[in-house]
Image: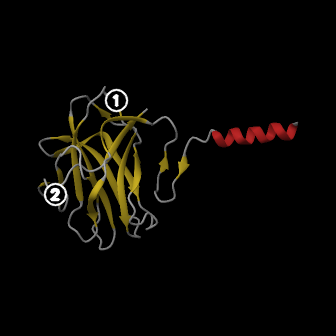
Amino acid sequence: MKKLILAILCVLCLSFQVGAYDPVFEQIIQGSGCDQIKTPTEDGASAGPRFIGGDDPEVYVATEFVYTGTTTQICKVDTWNSYNGTQGYNYYLAFYSDDGEPNVPITNGIAIVKFLDDSLGGDEVVVSWTFTTPPTLTNGVTYWLVMYTEQVDYGDYLEWHYESSGTTEHIVKDGDGLGTWTNQTTTSTCKFRLLSK
C-alpha cells in the first residue's frame, strides 16, 4: 500500500511541473496559464523569411499591427523562425509604439532569446518570447513588433518567416539600427501570435 501511495505522489509531482527548459534557447519557457490567444494573429502559410543579422545589413525587421480586444497584458509572443549559426548571439523582440514607423519600445516591451547553437537548423519552428514584466496593449492602438540583433556576423543569422496571404501590413528594415526604415511592400505580415493569461 505504501509503495502504491509513493508511486501516485511521484506521478503528481511530475504532473505539476510549472516550467520546462528548452536547451535551444537560453530562457525558461513559462508553464500553463499564458495561453489566451489575442488578435490579431498572423500564422498563415509561409512565403519566405526575412534575415536578421548574418552578412546582410538587415539587422532590424518590423511588422505593424492594430491590437483589437480588451486592454490586456501580453505574457508571451510566438513567432515563426529558423536559425543558422553557432555563435550564441542575443536576439530581441520588442513592442514599439507607432509614429508612422517604429518609434520607441513601449514600457516592459522587450523580450530576449539567445540562440546557443545551430540545433534549430533551417526548419521553421515556433519560438516563444516571454517577458519579465508583461507589457500592456490597448484596444485600437497601432504597434510594431520589431525583431533585431546587435551583431552582424557572416553565417550567423535569424530568419523571421512571413505569410503568403493575410493582412498586408508593411514589413520594414533598418540597415544599422540608426538609419531610416525602408518599406517592404512586396511581402505580407511577419508571422506572430499574441498570448495573455
Asked whether the residues under the numbered discs 1 and 2 touch, taking CB atoms below 8 Å apart as contact, a structural biologist would say no
- Could you say which is closer to the camera, residue 44 or residue 74? 44
Q: Position of residue 93 (x, y in %)?
A: 32, 50
Q: Amino acid at mark 1?
A: Thr
Q: Position of residue 180 (x, y in %)?
A: 11, 55
Q: Residue furthest top?
A: 70
Q: Residue furthest right?
A: 1
Q: Which residue is mark 2?
A: 178
SS at mark 2?
A: loop
Q: What colour-coding does the image apply?
A: secondary structure
Q: Earlier in the sequence, mark 1 or mark 2?
A: 1
Eye-nearest disc, 1 or 2: 1
Residue at (41%, 58%) from the top-left corner? 114
- The image quadrant where one finds the C terminus is top left
Residue at (16%, 49%) from the top-left corner? 170
SS at mark 1?
A: strand
Disc number at residue 55?
A: none
- The image quadrant where one finds the N terminus is top right
Q: Residue furthest bottom?
A: 154
Q: Quadrant of residue 90?
A: bottom left
Q: Amino acid at mark 2?
A: Leu
Q: Position of residue 116 (x, y in %)?
A: 45, 64
Vertical side of 139 occupied by 131: above or below: below
- Binning the other alpha carbons within 10 Å of mark 1 as few (below 14), some (14 to 19) or many (20 upward) gives some
Task: Find the distance from the CA under tag 1 to the CA under tag 2.
Answer: 31 Å
- Binning the other alpha carbons within 10 Å of mark 2 as few (below 14), some (14 to 19) or many (20 upward) gives few
Q: Which residue is mark 1?
A: 72
Residue at (64%, 40%) from the top-left corner? 15
| Count of numbered circles on the image | 2
Q: Position of residue 145 (x, y in %)?
A: 26, 46
Vertical side of 81 occupied by 53: above or below: below
